[in-house]
Image (cartoon, helix red, strand yellow):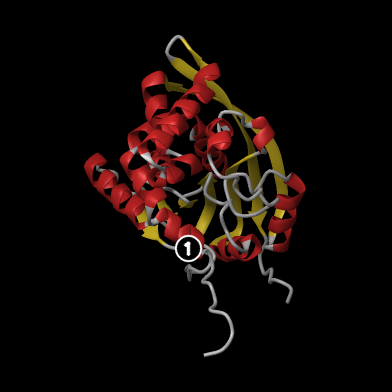
Amino acid sequence: MTGQQQTAPNQAQAELWNGPAGRNWVEQNALLDRLLAPLVPPLVEAVGRQGARAVLDVGCGAGGSTFAIAESLDRQGRCTGLDISAPLIDLARRRAAELEIDNADFLVADVQQHAFTPESFDAIISRFGVMFFDDPVIAFANLRAAARPDAGLACIAWRGTAENAFMTAAERAAAPLLPEPPPRAPNAPGQFAFADADYVAGILAKAGWRGVDLRPLDVACEISAEDLEIYAVRMGPVSLALPGLEPDHREAVIAAVKAGFAPFVTDGVARFTAACWMVTGRALSGHSLAT
């Protein structure tokens, strides 16, 4: 066999979210629901304004946003949650059964490759689930094909690192104690891939979305000091480095990370602003990608 082995689209993300990151999110789901709850109402409001009845929630995780959308719809409406992480979708399905939410269903799939039924959704939403595609134009074109003509898009994505000091506190605090990571490539898949508004607007225009708009969305969030103790060492890139460290080294990194979050804590609660974009658009009927 000659030549290099081909890497499947989004393979790195699939391995991450079906591996250590997915397990962490399953284990800390209740904490994450509490932390990210303030980011749900803007999406519920967007779906309500559109009068949607068939909604796709991209990157739904364990289903917190999917449940909120499903409960906001009448019984004629449904919300489908989709995620690349099988462990998170398994948890979402269990939670739906426990909560007796019968108008939410869940799908393990990669948006970039999944064969959606054409024109099956009249709204597509996401809370931090659309920044991880190897080829975002292909992914959003596939979503547009799954959307009915004029269906609405409403996605929340992080702005830049400079505006999200809380979200980067752990890696900044741990940096002196860990090998220097590769620099973040602008627009590369990851948490802050959609920091550049012009870049995002260009992706959506190429993928067949019209009326694209990115508006700053600044949301006040908080997390208890007790939850922060867990969040600081179990979530994010630093948490993935900890298991490979010697005990003394690991404890030093954990201490540094906790100290890095200390400036956010007052009276037992850490408060911060989630600096995001609300990305909206409409599906353009009959659009095809240029080749």
Count up the numbered dots: 1
161 lies left or right of 74: right
Residue at x 39% of width, y 60% of height: 108
Residue at x 64% of width, y 49% of height: 193
Camera-side residue of 193 and 155: 193
Residue at x 74% of width, y 52% of height: 199
Res 211 visible:
no
Camera-side residue of 290 and 221: 221
Seen as rendered, the residue at the extreme bottom is 1
Camera-side residue of 269 and 207: 269
Residue corresponding to mark 1: 110
Q: Amino acid at mark 1?
A: Asp
In the rendering, at what x and y percent does residue 74 appear?
A: 39, 43
In the rendering, at what x and y percent does residue 141 appear?
A: 62, 64
Decide: is 90 above or below 250. Answer: below
Q: Residues within 10 Å of mark 1 (few under 14, many from 20)?
A: many
Camera-side residue of 210 and 18: 18
In the rendering, at what x and y percent does residue 138 appear?
A: 62, 66
Seen as rendered, the residue at the extreme top is 267
Label 1 SS: loop
Q: Quadrant of residue 167?
A: top right
1 lies left or right of 104: right
Seen as rendered, the residue at the extreme right is 198
Q: Quadrant of the C terminus?
A: bottom right
Residue at x 54% of width, y 65% of height: 112
Decide: is 89 above or below 230. Answer: below
Q: Quadrant of residue 159?
A: top right
Seen as rendered, the residue at the extreme left is 98
Decide: is 171 above or below 117. Answer: above
Decide: is 209 above or below 37. Answer: below
179 lies left or right of 61: right
Res 26 visible:
yes
